Amino acid sequence: MPSEDLVEKMNSLLPPQIRLWGIQRVNNSFNSHLHCDSRVYEYILPSHCFLPPKPGSTAASCVIPLESQNRPPEPEDTFWDSIIDSDYFSLLRRYTANKKESQVERLPELSKEELERFENIKAKETAEIRAFRISPARLERIRALVKLYQGTHNFHNLTIGVPYNSSQAKRYIIAIDIGEPHLIGSTEWLRIKIHGQSFMLHQIRKMIGAVLMAIRYGAGEESIRMTLTTSENMHIPKAPAQGLLLERPIFSGMAQKLEKTGNEALHWEPYEEKIEKFKDDFIYKSIFRETTSENVYELPFSGCMANRVFRFHEFINFMDSFRYHKGKGLSMFVQGKEEEPVESFQKEEEDVDSIKGDGDQAMS
């Protein structure tokens, strides 16, 4: 057996971003890939991603009225009322369009008074978003939605290139939970843990994207059930890869075999405290630094998504400005709120994600 201080000695030779937690004996036939019978992923995102779309955005016209959502009011419903003025988007377009190198059309420059007012709106938005704390009522609704993924379902709408009638579309989610909100710096974050047998390409990110759409646009539980039951193709955007990490592989079957032969089972529990501290020091804070250093006021992204890596604010802006084909995406989530087709979101995803595989892209 290795010496007791071998883990400490090996870690002393590694950079702090790479850690060895422990060493355990296994039998000669052990294969970490083949004997992994399930995996636990974690997705982390700012709680303000669940705010409704900004008034005046394309998606704002798709939001189901509160009186039709069959729920009591929540503080988030009126979040933008004291922040966004009626001409905010007009000022934003003029502000950003004239700063681009290539312009389709030249828009009037902002006057000194308009620029000052616009800067004040930007500063207030930044402060309010970073100070935002999700209400218990909205958090419970999000928890109820993610629970709908538990069990065996057809996830063909939550991956790329897998048809409805394919056996590969059936996946088993063992558990999915959202812990209490977590403060990183001054921003509140939600941590979603997903334990499943196996995952398809982008499945987790699309699962999160569907929940964001359901909450932000008021579509509710029926929209999630629709993604899991309809044979129609729904165009669900992927949440940013920035927030996804593979937390741990699970070796339940191998653990039982090891115990029968007198060896110690493969469990992560002895290292929980160290793992959580590592995530705080090297993963959560890194994501937070990237997020807080970004300018959240750029004009919502438009154009081809190829080679584009979205961060959280860009993803939300994209969701709120994108127009789907009739009968796809938003119009399937929000009945009767169809948008005229502009470009195919699904086609762009297929162009970018031509390589298909079993599993999502994640930090690990």
Image: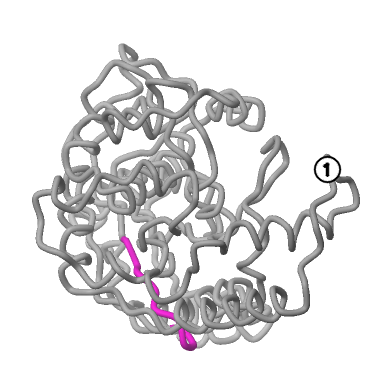
Would you say 308 lies left or right of 153 here?
A: right
Residue 19 sits inside the magenta stretch: no
Name above or below for residue 272 compared with residue 296: below
Name above or below for residue 60 compared with residue 80: above
Magenta part mainly helix, strand or loop?
strand
**Residue at image location 36% in from the left, 58% down from the top:** 52
Q: Nearer the viewer, residue 84 or 334?
A: 84
Q: Amino acid at mark 1?
A: Glu
Residue 67 can be seen, yes or no: yes
Name above or below for residue 115 compared with residue 70: below
Q: Nearer the viewer, residue 41 or 89?
A: 89
Q: Would you name the residue on which mark 1 appears?
A: 105
**Could you tell me residue 261's position as x and y percent?**
23, 55
**Could you tell me residue 105's position as x and y percent?**
83, 43
Residue 6 can be seen, yes or no: no
Q: Which quadrant of the structure image shows residue 291? A: bottom right
Specify the quadrant that holds the N terminus. Answer: bottom left
Would you say 132 lies left or right of 201 here?
A: left
Q: Give the residues drawn in magenta, as a range.
A: 184-192
**Residue at image location 69% in from the left, 81% down from the top:** 116
Residue furthest right as drawn: 101
**Residue at image location 54% in from the left, 59% down from the top:** 363
